[in-house]
Amino acid sequence: MTPAELNVVVLAATTVVLLGVAAIRISTGAGLPSLLLYLVIGLVIGEAGLGVGFDDAALTQTLGTLALAVILAEGGLSTRLSVLRPVAARAAVLATVGVAVSVTITSALAWWLLDVDPRTAVLLGAVVSSTDAAAVFAVLRTLRLRPRTRATLEAESGFNDPPVIILVTLVVSDLWHELDVWTAVLGFAQQMVVGAVAGVAVAVAGRWMLRRVALPSAGLYPLATLAFALMAFGAAGTVGGSPFVAVYLAGLLLGGADLPHRRATLGFAEGLAWLSQIGLFVLLGLLASPARLVDAVLPALVVGVALTLVARPVSVWLSTLPFRVPLREQAFISWAGLRGAVPIVLATFPITAGLAGAQRIFDVTFLLVVVFTLVQGPTLPWAARRLGVLEPAQTEELTIEHAPLEDLGASMLSFDIPAGSRLAGLKVAELRLPGNAVLALVLRDGRLFAPPPDAALHVGDQLLLAGPTTHRAAVERRLRALSRAGRLATWFGERGDQPRR
């Protein structure tokens, strides 16, 4: 590539990224999922628009897999373990039993209604049965859902990729002609268990290192944290486990740890996840051909209706029976099973395997994702209100950042006082911080000052504290307790032990 060609590539790539960023703003205002606008950008750039030809399904599959790894890592990092634990069992059943039920029903209806061969029917049922982490994380986090409902949907979308990927891989391979249930079950169990072990092992090592090593720049902590999460992806794949399970679990464990510069880490991971979404959906839009999509309209509607109105509700109902989930919550979980990049990426597997009718499977899947995301996404706020799964407005939890000062045996803590926090109105002397920790600086309305003991704190103040590292956890607990219960926190029994979300 010549320097002139490189300049053109950089100019085009940055233009696409900026268009993607603008699409986020447009989609938010219009109430549409941003992934649809990314796909449109890809279609406009492609052969039917600006004439950029692109038909490399193998490259799309590779880049799509990497993008999904980043998206899952960010999803794990930003999910609180305290919220996930109570719903882990039902999310796991949804991601396994639910997927099996959904694939079975969708495949049977596709075979019966579309008159396709069994292999094509199974592929159609499998590629669309996995809910998409990118779509779920992007859309649901704009809603104030009850923590259990949101955590169930997010965990399901993080864990239901491996079963579908394993199934699609087996169906497109030569093993299809000699496939038996035990082979599939054993393969699935191996990938899940090995992937989980790899993810936990890498996350434990990452937590140990990041807590004990004082890096020379704050910007290195987000980079190192995300690198550990993606290391789990590569390690699991190398030893025969599921990389997707590993990266999501590693993200969960790293995000749940008390690591330095947590807020900066989450911001970095979120930005990288948005970049991955933009690049992935634009690439998938480039791979699609509008001329072929016309013939896929009827099959896409048939498969989409079978999936959304029959297979998904039945799978959710059966999977949540042991957990006594209310019918209203079941209905929302069923309707919020969004499809996005994962089904379209999986639809490239038959193309790279050279199967007959593979292009038609891709076109049907692409159109199904567009149409049903366009229907489901904008209606989710209405459905959440009607079904009563929205959380009442609550006081925002105090978010504390810390950075180690290794040579001094001390730590710096910084935080903002959010609206509703009972820290507002307290005087500095009333904080009574453990370990002789000191409130060093306050930034208020652009003015920085060292507060005297009788200075009162205000909502919106940005505070910087210093104290011995050995007492840092106690200082954080004291600050959270004061934020929740005010100067009488100890009297009310508020200890501030666990951040709430």
Image: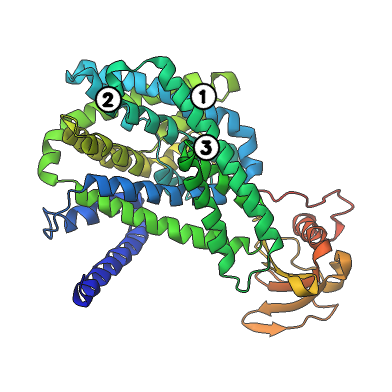
* Mark 1 surroundings within 10 Å by alpha-carbon count, few (fewer than 14), some (14 through 19), many (20 or more): few
In the rendered picture of this protein, how many numbered marks are placed on residues? 3
Q: What percent of the width, then of the height, locates residue 351?
A: 21, 37
Question: What's the residue type where badge 1 is placed?
Answer: Leu
Pointer 3 with pointer 1, Cβ within 8 A: no
Where disc 2 sits, the SS reads helix
- Sequence-wise, the earlier of marks 3 and 1 is 3
- Residue picked out by circle 1: 327
- Spatial CA span between label 1 and label 2: 42 Å
Q: Is residue 251 visible?
A: yes
Q: Nearer the viewer, residue 60 or 201?
A: 201
CA distance separating discs 3 and 1 = 33 Å
* Residue at 50 percent of width and 45 percent of height: 235
* 43 left or right, relative to 126: left
Residue that label 2 marks = 174
Query: Mark 3 and mark 2 in contact (Cβ < 8 Å)?
Result: no
- Which residue position holds label 3? 195
Q: Residue at x 55, y 54 (%)?
A: 228
Q: Position of residue 46 (x, y in %)?
A: 16, 55
Residue 455 lies, with reference to residue 194, above or below; the image says below
Q: Is residue 234 above or below residue 404?
A: above
The amino acid pointed to by label 2 is: Asp
